[in-house]
Image (tube, rainbow, N blue to C red):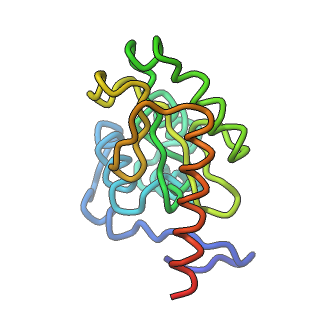
Amino acid sequence: MTMSVNGEITIDISDVLDEYPNAKRDALIPLLQDVQEKHGYLSKEAIIQIGEHLDLPASKIYGVATFYNQFRFQPLGTYHIQVCRGTACHVKGSSSVLDAIRNELSIEPGETSRDGLFSLEVVACVGACGLAPVICINGEFFAAMTSASVRNLLEEYRERAEEDDDE
């Protein structure tokens, strides 16, 4: 990472771009995937750099990237929450679980909380239908979630983050 003029952290993707010498438009999606895999998300600066590398306008790069839900435009939080919205979870009330998370964290799916602690993603299915409704935080599954259990769980993660900060 490098610092930009205005003090914001920007990502240097030149190492990824170097893997695509003389690349054309057909390399766009693999290039986007590689940048996101290495840096966690696609920053505005990365999209501009990719556009310059491929000789494509940034608007075209952004248009392609926003078409696919695999791409993120903000860094993930320390704790990445995935809310399952598959059929079993939907029937068992995952919409109220999602609403509780949105209200508790004041973020929408695809966003990261201001403190960088939590990010939220809605997924089609996590494959744990018998445990519905399910959320997953950094790969750990939590079953039979309710609005109340969401609040308690998020508080546990906040406390965990404070303990980690104290160390």
Residue 165, image x, y percentages:
56, 81
Where 103 sits versus 158, above or below? Answer: above
Q: Nearer the viewer, residue 101 or 110?
A: 101
Residue 60, image x, y percentages:
53, 35
Q: Quadrant of residue 37?
A: bottom left
User: Which residue sits at x=43%, y=30%?
Assistant: 144
Residue 123, image x, y percentages:
42, 30
Farthest residue to the bottom: give it: 167
Residue 143, image x, y percentages:
39, 35
So how many labels did they put on this image? 0
Q: In which quarter of the image is residue 59?
A: top right
Where 109 sits versus 47, above or below? Answer: above
User: Which residue sits at x=57%, y=54%?
Assistant: 118
User: Which residue sits at x=47%, y=37%?
Assistant: 65
User: Which residue sits at x=39%, y=12%?
Assistant: 87
Q: Nearer the viewer, residue 126 or 141?
A: 141
- On screen, residue 32 versus residue 110, left or right, reads left
Q: Quadrant of residue 71?
A: top left
- On screen, residue 8 versus residue 120, left or right, reads right
Where 20 sits versus 62, above or below? Answer: below
- On screen, residue 56 versus residue 104, left or right, reads left
